[in-house]
C-alpha cells in the first residue's frame, strides 16, 4: 500500500498542519517508507492473537473520587494571550 | 399517498454524579466562576497525565447492571480527534472499539389505562468519556470566550439501536432513561444545567422497506417537549422533502425552540473523520467479577421490578404502580406511608400520593423529598380514614393542617380541632330531625318523588354536623326517617 499526495494533504489538514508542496512531497516519501515497514510486519501470522490496546500488559490505576485541586486560574491565565472576565479569549468560532 | 415509517435512535450524554472530574482532581460542582475549576490536566498543559476516577467507573457498572447489559471485563479509552477551542487537548478521551457497557435494554410504557402497552428498546452500548468546555459566543471584541470548568466532567454516553418508531416512543424512552439514571444515583438528571442531553437520529422510509433511510441527527435536545417538537418537525420536513423529489443528505441539525424548526448546521466535509486510536496515556480499564458483584449487591430494587411488586403486593393498577415508581423518592414515600397505615389502605394511599400530595407539591413547586407532610404523617392520616375516625373530606382538612405545620400528627390535629367523625346515630338522628323541621318544602318535594331534594337534605345534615358525620350513615338514617 502506498499513499497519494492528496491523502498526505488531507491528513495534514485534519491535523491543522500547514505543509508546502515540497514538504508534502517529502512527507509522502517518509510515510511510504513507514508503510513499507508495516507491510513487512503484516506478513506475520497473528491469527488468534488479541489486539493490544497498550504496549504494557497492565491495568489502569484508579483514583479515589476526591477534589484535590485548588483554583489556580490566575497563574494559568498569566500565560494566556488574552482573557476577559475569567474567560480565555480565542478568535471567534461560528457554527 | 405513500405511508411512511419513522425510525429513531437516541444518544444520551448523562453527566455522572462524582465530586471530581473523570481524569483530574478538579471539582465538578455546577455554577462556579469561569475557569476556577480547571486544573493543568483539564486545560491540557504539556506533560500532564490523566488518572481515571473510580467513582465514574462504578457509575458505569451500575448502569450496565440496571439495563441488563454486559459490563466489559476490559475496556479501552481512545482519543477522538477534532479541533475546537473548548477542547484544549485537540482530542476528547472517549471509548471506541471496546466500550465499558455492551448491549442492555430499557422498557418503555406507552398509552394509559387499558391502552397501556410496553416496548423494549435495545441499547447498543454505553461508554465513558470526558465532557468538553463551554464556548461563549457573546461578543468579546470580536472574540469567543472559553470556560473550561466543564472540561473533563465525566459523561456516560448511552446509545440505542434504531428501535423507536415515533416521537412519542422517543420521549417515552428518554423519560424512562432519565428516571433510571436518577433512580440508580449516577446522574442528577438536571436538564437545564445540561446534566442529561439527548441527540436524536431521525430517518423515514416507506412502510415495508427494509433499508433505513438517510438519517439526520438533531443535537442537544435539553427538554422532553423540545424533543417531541423537534422530531415531529424533522419527520414532517423529511417526508415533504422526499415527496417533493428531494433526497435527504446526512447532516447534523439544530432545533430552534422559537421557530419550532430544525435547521442543518453548516456541514464540514471532515467533521466525522475523528481518527480514533487507543490513548497511550491510559491503560485498559479492567473490571473484575468481584467488583461487578459487589456493585450488584448494593443496587436498589429497579423500577420495573418494583412496579411489578407494587401490582402484586398492593393490588394496584399498572397505571398507579407506574406513577408510584416514577422515582425512587416517590416509591420510598409510598412504602413508608403504607408501613404506618397498613396494606388494606394501599389503594387509597396510592390516590393520596399520586393525586392530592402530588397536586399540593406541584402547586408549591416542591419535590416529594422535601414535602412538609412526611410519609409517616400521611400514613397516620390514612389510618384514621380506614378506621372511620374521619371521613375522606375531613381528611383533606387534616392534610392541609399537617401541611401548614399545625400539628405533629393527624391524631393531634383531629383531637385539637374536634374533627372526629360523629358515629353516634342518636346524635345524628336529632340533627336530622332539626333539619327536617326547618326544611318542610324540601321534604314535600322529596315526597312528591324528587330525588334531588333528598340529596339537598343530606347536604343540610352534613352541614349541620360540620362535615363530621359519615355521609353513608346519614343517608341510611335519613332514608329511614323519610320512608
Image (tube, helix red, strand yellow):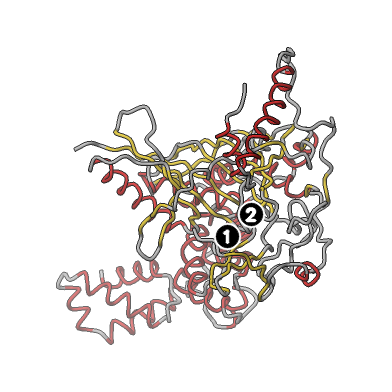
Please give the chain letter of the residue carrying mark 1.
B
Residue at horizontal 77 percent and vertical 39 percent from the top: B280
In this view, the residue farthest toward the left is B448
User: Which residue, as the protein is rendered here, is positioned at the far front?
Assistant: A22
Q: Secondary structure at mark 1?
A: loop
Give A67 or A36, whichever is nearer the viewer.
A36
Position of residue B216 measured from the top left corner of the image (x, y, whole percent): 42, 44
Q: How many marks?
A: 2
Disc 2 designates what residue?
B15
Q: Classify mark 2: residues with Cα within 10 Å, few (<14), some (14-19) or many (20+).
A: many
Q: Is residue B245 above or below residue B324?
A: above
Query: Residue at position x 81%, y 61% from top?
Result: A67
Decide which of tag 2 and tag 1 comes sooner along the chain: 2
The image shows residue B258 at horizontal and vertical percentages of 38, 66
Secondary structure category for the residue under label 2: strand
At which x and y percent is residue B212? 39, 32
Residue B351 position (above or below residue B91): below
In the rendered structure, the answer to whether residue B212 lies left or right of residue B268 reads left
- Mark 2 → mark 1, Cα distance in angstroms: 8 Å
Q: How many other residues sit within 10 Å of disc 1, few (<14), some (14-19) or many (≥20)?
A: some
Q: Which quadrant of the figure has residue B69? A: top right
Horizontal relation, residue B347 to residue B84: left or right: left
Give the residue pinned by disc 1: B194
Do residues under tags 2 and 1 come within 8 Å of each other at their CB atoms?
yes
Q: Is residue B339 visible?
A: no
Whether callout 2 and callout 1 share a subunit is answered yes
Residue A93, placed above or below residue B52: below
Amino acid at each position: 500500500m502506498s499513499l497519494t499526495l492528496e491523502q498526505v494533504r488531507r491528513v495534514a489538514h485534519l491535523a491543522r498542519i500547514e505543509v508546502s508542496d515540497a514538504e508534502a512531497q517529502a512527507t509522502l516519501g517518509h510515510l511510504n517508507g513507514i508503510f513499507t515497514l508495516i507491510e513487512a510486519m503484516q506478513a506475520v501470522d497473528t491469527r488468534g492473537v488479541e489486539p493490544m490496546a497498550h504496549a504494557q500488559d497492565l491495568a489502569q490505576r484508579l483514583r479515589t473520587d476526591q477534589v484535590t485541586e485548588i483554583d489556580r486560574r490566575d497563574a494559568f491565565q498569566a500565560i494566556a494571550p488574552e482573557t476577559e472576565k475569567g474567560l480565555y479569549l480565542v478568535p471567534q468560532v461560528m457554527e | 399517498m405513500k405511508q411512511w415509517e419513522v425510525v429513531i435512535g437516541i444518544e444520551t450524554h448523562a453527566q455522572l454524579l462524582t465530586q471530581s472530574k473523570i481524569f483530574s482532581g478538579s471539582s465538578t460542582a455546577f455554577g462556579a466562576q469561569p475557569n476556577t475549576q480547571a486544573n493543568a490536566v483539564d486545560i491540557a498543559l504539556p506533560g500532564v497525565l490523566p488518572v481515571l476516577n473510580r467513582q465514574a467507573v462504578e457509575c458505569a457498572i451500575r448502569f450496565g447492571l440496571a439495563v441488563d447489559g454486559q459490563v466489559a471485563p476490559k475496556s479501552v479509552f481512545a482519543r477522538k480527534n477534532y479541533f475546537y477551542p473548548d477542547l484544549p487537548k485537540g482530542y476528547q478521551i472517549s471509548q471506541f472499539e471496546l466500550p465499558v457497557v455492551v448491549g442492555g435494554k430499557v422498557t418503555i410504557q406507552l398509552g394509559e389505562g387499558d391502552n397501556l402497552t410496553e416496548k423494549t428498546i435495545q441499547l447498543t452500548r454505553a461508554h465513558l468519556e470526558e465532557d468538553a468546555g463551554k464556548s461563549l459566543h457573546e461578543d468579546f471584541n470580536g472574540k469567543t470566550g472559553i470556560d473550561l470548568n466543564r472540561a473533563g466532567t465525566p459523561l456516560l454516553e448511552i446509545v440505542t439501536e434504531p428501535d423507536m418508531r415515533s416521537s412519542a416512543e422517543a420521549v417515552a424512552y428518554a423519560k424512562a432513561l432519565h428516571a433510571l439514571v436518577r433512580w440508580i444515583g449516577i446522574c442528577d438528571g438536571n436538564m437545564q444545567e445540561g446534566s442529561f442531553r439527548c441527540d436524536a437520529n431521525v430517518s423515514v422510509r416507506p412502510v415495508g422497506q427494509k433499508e433505513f433511510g438517510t438519517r439526520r441527527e438533531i443535537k442537544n435536545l435539553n427538554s422532553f417537549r423540545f424533543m417531541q417538537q423537534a422530531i415531529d418537525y424533522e419527520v414532517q420536513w423529511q417526508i415533504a422533502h422526499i415527496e417533493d423529489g428531494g433526497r435527504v443528505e446526512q447532516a447534523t441539525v439544530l432545533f430552534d425552540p422559537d421557530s419550532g424548526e430544525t435547521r442543518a448546521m453548516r456541514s464540514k466535509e471532515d467533521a466525522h473523520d475523528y481518527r480514533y486510536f487507543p490513548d497511550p496515556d491510559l491503560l485498559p480499564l479492567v473490571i473484575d467479577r468481584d467488583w461487578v458483584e459487589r456493585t450488584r449487591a448494593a443496587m436498589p430494587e429497579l423500577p420495573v421490578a418494583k412496579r411489578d411488586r407494587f401490582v402484586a403486593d398492593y393490588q394496584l393498577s399498572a397505571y398507579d404502580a407506574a406513577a408510584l415508581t416514577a422515582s425512587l423518592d416517590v416509591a420510598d414515600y409510598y412504602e413508608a406511608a403504607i408501613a404506618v397505615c397498613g396494606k388494606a389502605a394501599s389503594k387509597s394511599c396510592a390516590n393520596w400520593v399520586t393525586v392530592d400530595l402530588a397536586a399540593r407539591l406541584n402547586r408549591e413547586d416542591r419535590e416529594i423529598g422535601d414535602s412538609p407532610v412526611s410519609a409517616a404523617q400521611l400514613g397516620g392520616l390514612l389510618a384514621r380514614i380506614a378506621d372511620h375516625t374521619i371521613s375522606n373530606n375531613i381528611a383533606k382538612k387534616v392534610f392541609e393542617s399537617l401541611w401548614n405545620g399545625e400539628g405533629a400528627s393527624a391524631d393531634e390535629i383531629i383531637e385539637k380541632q374536634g374533627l372526629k367523625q360523629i358515629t353516634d346515630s342518636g346524635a345524628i338522628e336529632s340533627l336530622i330531625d332539626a333539619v327536617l323541621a326547618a326544611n318542610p318544602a324540601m321534604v314535600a318535594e322529596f315526597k312528591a318523588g324528587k330525588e334531588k331534594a333528598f340529596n339537598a337534605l343530606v347536604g343540610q345534615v352534613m352541614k349541620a354536623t360540620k362535615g363530621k358525620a359519615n355521609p353513608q350513615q346519614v343517608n341510611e338514617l335519613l332514608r329511614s326517617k323519610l320512608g
